Image: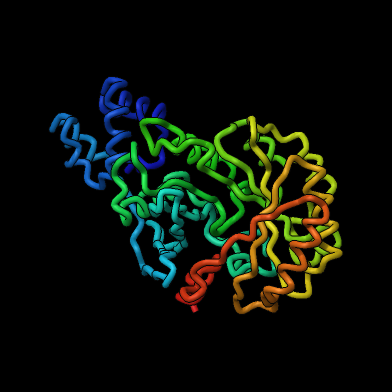
Amino acid sequence: MQSLLELNQTELALWLARELGEKRFRAQQIFQWLWQKLVRDIAQMSNVSLRTRELLAQKASIPWPRIVTIQKSQDGTTKFLLELGDGARVETVLIPAEDHAGRIRWTQCLSSQIGCPMACTFCATGQSGFTRNMTAGEILSQVLIGRDYLGDTRPDHPILRNLVFMGMGEPLMNCQELLKALEILNDPHGLAFSPRRITVSTCGIKDGLAKLGAAGLSYLAVSLHAPNQALREKIMPRAARLPLDELLRCLRSYPLKNREHITFEYLLLRDVNDSPSQAHELAKIVHSVHGKLNLIVYNATNGPYQAPSPERVLDFEKALWSHHLTAIVRQSKGQDIDAACGQLKARFEN
């Protein structure tokens, strides 16, 4: 049984021609039903002939994941634990923000793997181990769940505005399926997201960076979290196998569009990477690349780390200011609902 969610529009057209003898235009119709009208039942594709629907239902499926549980924070952040077809479980999160007109717009945090092979010491997902890569259809089914939950059925006026690959997994360790998912996300007959509305976050996979840059289908964020190689080896040992100097060389050659920057994500861990001297080191890194900086105050899990005090965060910021570098301190949301990556899945499995 062919999952229709696993096919880009070109693949769908070829499959329909081979299996059902259908013309190319039929692929566009079905594609829109899948991604824009959120249909789960082939029988509901009303502009497709009854005979074609019957034949299609015999050979294909639309496998949405099962929602195991939903947790909603006081600040509106909503976290889903989803179960895929083989029973594997994965998390996705909807994060609200108010725009300039006072309207609520949403960002969805997406997972790309079941677990994560990178084993970063501060990450609940990394400590839970790695099971397998997600397919492109499984990655994209998270967006279908999010849009359906929000009642977001008008592509011309979307409520879900931004997508960030910052959930479970290292996206560039699953590069082939990631790029296929990005292609469907960018397709105007699919989910119709602009590359400017999609960010892929990576701790630095050399081959994957080259492929992602060549595709031009998203913005790039780099999970740095340490201002030097020695500390990176300590808290991100597998990511640090690509030396920091070599990572920065890759980033200097990364293709950027007009007004585009590489975003560095820096998780502040109390008494680990949050001193003013480390801020000075970090500023030099950001200035060496066409970059900007997001600071994230640690959302404590069961690990050995703690969040720095507000005063400590301010001291870190002041050190950055002395280098004429302004960093965005990303507001920590969902602290009352196991919002850190991997926490909800770990709690259910334990």
Asked if one can make out residue 128 in the rendered structure from this viewpoint, the answer is: yes
Which residue is rendered at x = 43% and y = 53% of the image? 106
- Front-most of 307 and 242? 307
User: Residue 320's spot in the image, x, y percent?
Assistant: 78, 57
Left or right, 53 with respect to 236, comes to left
Which residue is rendered at x = 27% and y = 29% of the image? 29
User: Residue 62's spot in the image, x, y percent?
Assistant: 30, 46
- Front-most of 249 and 103? 103
- Front-most of 340 and 171? 340
- Front-most of 324 and 245? 324
User: Residue 273's spot in the image, x, y percent?
Assistant: 78, 67
Left or right, 170 with respect to 146, comes to right
Left or right, 12 with respect to 213, comes to left
In the rendered view, how is the structure colored? rainbow
Q: Quadrant of residue 60?
A: top left
Looking at the image, which residue sits at the far front? 101
Looking at the image, which residue sits at the far left? 50
User: Residue 279's spot in the image, x, y percent?
Assistant: 81, 61
Q: Quadrant of residue 76?
A: bottom left
Which residue is rendered at x = 68% and y = 43% of the image? 262
Q: In the rendered view, tell whether residue 182 sits above or below residue 124.
A: above
Asked if one can make out residue 228 in the rendered structure from this viewpoint, the answer is: no
Q: How many marks?
A: 0
Q: In the rendered view, tell whether residue 308 sits above or below residue 126.
A: below
Quadrant for the N terminus, please: top left
Which residue is rendered at x = 22% and y = 41% of the image? 42
Q: In the rendered view, tell whether residue 342 sits above or below residue 17.
A: below
